[in-house]
Image (cartoon, grey):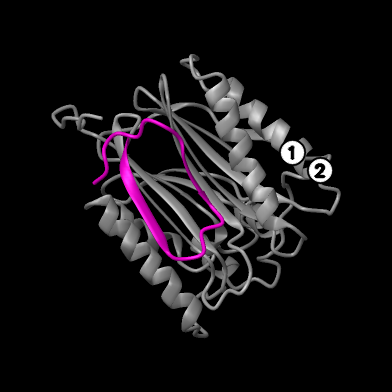
Amino acid sequence: MSPVLSEPQLLIDVRQPTRVDGYVADGVYAAFTAPYPEATGPNQDCALIAPTSGGGVLAVADGLGGAPAGHDASRLAVEHLRRCLVADSDLQDARTPILDAFESANAAIRELSVGAATTLAVVELRDRVLRPYHVGDSSILVCGSRGKVKFLSLSHSPVGYGVEAGLIDANEALHHEELNLVSNTLGTSSMRIELGTPFALAEQDTVLLGTDGLFDNLHLAEIIDVIRAGALDAAADELARQATARMVTPSDDKPSKPDDLTFVLYRPLRPSQVMPSR
């Protein structure tokens, strides 16, 4: 396991399956990214793990494959987030730089003038309190050690809204013909930031941020079963293995959607655990 993170760690345009791990915000993290199997173009997913004076920030972004320059859009999203966090590094509360990053990245993506767009999911961590922010269908999940879902972000998509309204079964949604559609993205004049209420994490809670390469290939129960307990680095490896296997070997009764795959896992350390020295 790597030492305590002292500077923002960016995963941008990663062309090979890559896992990184370490300590941030009084907890442990493990992140993974890979282009979709047999990809010939750039990885359109990006991730950020950043320490702050009050804790830390985690983020994933997924450039829309159906629009041009998706990899540029996701890169701009995480780069603007890093810049805003560094510029306001003395702030205990990261709310302002995070919201500034959403706005400035949205403007920069629109200035590309090619129709580029991306999702962006962010969590702020401070004193074992989490606050979620997101645009699009990249998801934020918090679950307990026994598998209880304590938070799941609403996917900004027709299918996501249908599931939330009870019109579409969550398992059936993974086979829906409109699964690839997204209703709210960075890169548009109508971009809307969903900002969640802060809530406290319990000792054994696990936080997961993931692009649809994860959530469209595994059922929620399958994801939770992997991440709810055990070492995070092992959980990251297993999530990547299972999601990639679904992409490579499709079947009629299981979801399968070839896509770039990126996620970040986080779990707070127990009071009895000691953070390693920098």
SS of the residue under disc 1: helix
Residue 225 visible in this rendered orientation of the protein: no
Q: Is label 1 in contact with label 2 (beta carbons under 8 Å)?
A: yes
Tag on residue 36?
none
Residue nearer the viewer, 19 or 141: 19
Residue in the image at 32% along x and 51% along y: 147
In the rendering, at what x and y percent does residue 77 appear? 64, 42
The magenta stretch is: 1-23
Neighbours of disc 2 within 10 Å: few (<14), some (14-19), many (20+):
some
Amino acid type, label 1: Asn
Q: Outermost residue, left direction?
A: 272
Residue at numbered disc 1: 106
- The crowd level at tag 1 (other Cα within 10 Å; few <14, some 14-19, many 20+) is many
Residue 10: in magenta span: yes
- In the picture, residue 133 is in which quadrant? top right
Compared with 6, 92 (above or below) is above
Taking 6 as reference, is 69 above or below it? below
Q: Residue at x 57, y 64 (%)?
A: 169
Dot 2 lies on which element? Answer: helix
Residue placed most toward the observer, 41 or 219: 41
Q: Is residue 187 visible?
A: yes
The image shows residue 114, relative to residue 41, as above or below, that is above
Horizontal and vertical percent position of residue 267: 31, 40
In the rendered image, residue 214, in percent from the top left (x then y), is placed at: 49, 62
Q: Seen in the image, is 101 located left or right of residue 271?
A: right
- Label 1 to label 2: alpha-carbon separation: 6 Å
Q: Position of residue 104 (x, y in %)?
A: 72, 32
Q: Pick the quarter of the image with the C terminus.
A: top left
Q: Residue at x 71, y 67 (%)?
A: 178
Residue designated by label 2: 110
